[in-house]
Amino acid sequence: MAQVKLTQITKVVNGKILFEAPNLTAHTGEIVGIIGNNGAGKTTLMKIIANQDPDFDGQRLVQGSVVLVRQVNPLVDQSGGQTTITNIRTALAQHAAILILDEPTANLDEEHQDWLIGQLRHFAGLVLLISHDQHLLKQVATKIWSVSNHAYQQFDGGLTEFERLNNQNQASQFREYQR
């Protein structure tokens, strides 16, 4: 059974559709990379999953405890990297069933990025990972949720497979356009 199942989700902001997610599922042991342009609704979708945004249409089924680590604004006495590491360690110590990370490598040096990759690979639950960091996504993502044109799509497989399929689809669409 799915640990996260979103069906016919529609999020409207100021009278306009921010995104639709017709069918997204994720299971224990998966690391889902969530990709798309800034402002497309990635963080908003994570707030819906974490039950921090009840203002949406559709069905949300989430089984297990959720911890959300937001993108960091550095604390006065710590760097962004130190704050990020502290927040991730605190989240991991909670042993939640679902770990949501929003741009976790934005402030990390290479050593701490490698540490994070190791932590994610050994996490026992479900990881939902918002990131523009292609290296991170290629290292750990086992599934991709991609948002474009206000709609989410799910792709089984990592970022490399997603890119290959996406390039094939674009080439096919271009050939159809040329006919």
Image (spheres, rainbow, N blue to C red):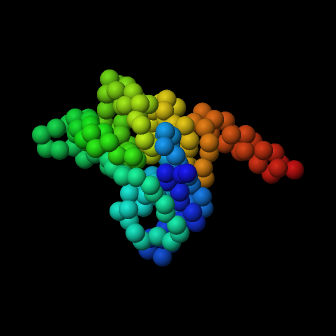
The residue lying furthest to the right in this view is: 179
Q: Is residue 87 above or below residue 135?
A: below
Q: Quadrant of residue 116?
A: top left
Seen from the viewer's position, the closer of residues 128 and 77 is 128
The residue lying furthest to the bottom in this view is: 15
Q: Is residue 123 above or below residue 179?
A: above
Residue 62 percent location from the top left of the image: 45, 57
Seen from the viewer's position, the closer of residues 166 and 24 is 24
Confirm whether residue 80 shows in the render: no
- At 22% from the left and 35% from the top, the residue drawn is 82
Q: Is residue 150 above or below residue 12?
A: above
The residue lying furthest to the front in this view is: 1
Q: Is residue 30 left or right of residue 169?
A: left
- At 37% from the left and 31% from the top, the residue drawn is 119
- At 67% from the left and 36% from the top, the residue drawn is 164
Seen from the viewer's position, the closer of residues 35 and 3 is 3
Q: Is residue 67 left or right of residue 60?
A: left
Confirm whether residue 155 shows in the render: yes
Residue 90 percent location from the top left of the image: 24, 41
Seen from the viewer's position, the closer of residues 71 and 31 is 31
The residue lying furthest to the top in this view is: 111
- At 53% from the left and 69% from the top, the residue drawn is 58
Residue 103 percent location from the top left of the image: 38, 43
Residue 152 percent location from the top left of the image: 57, 56
- Tally the marks: 0
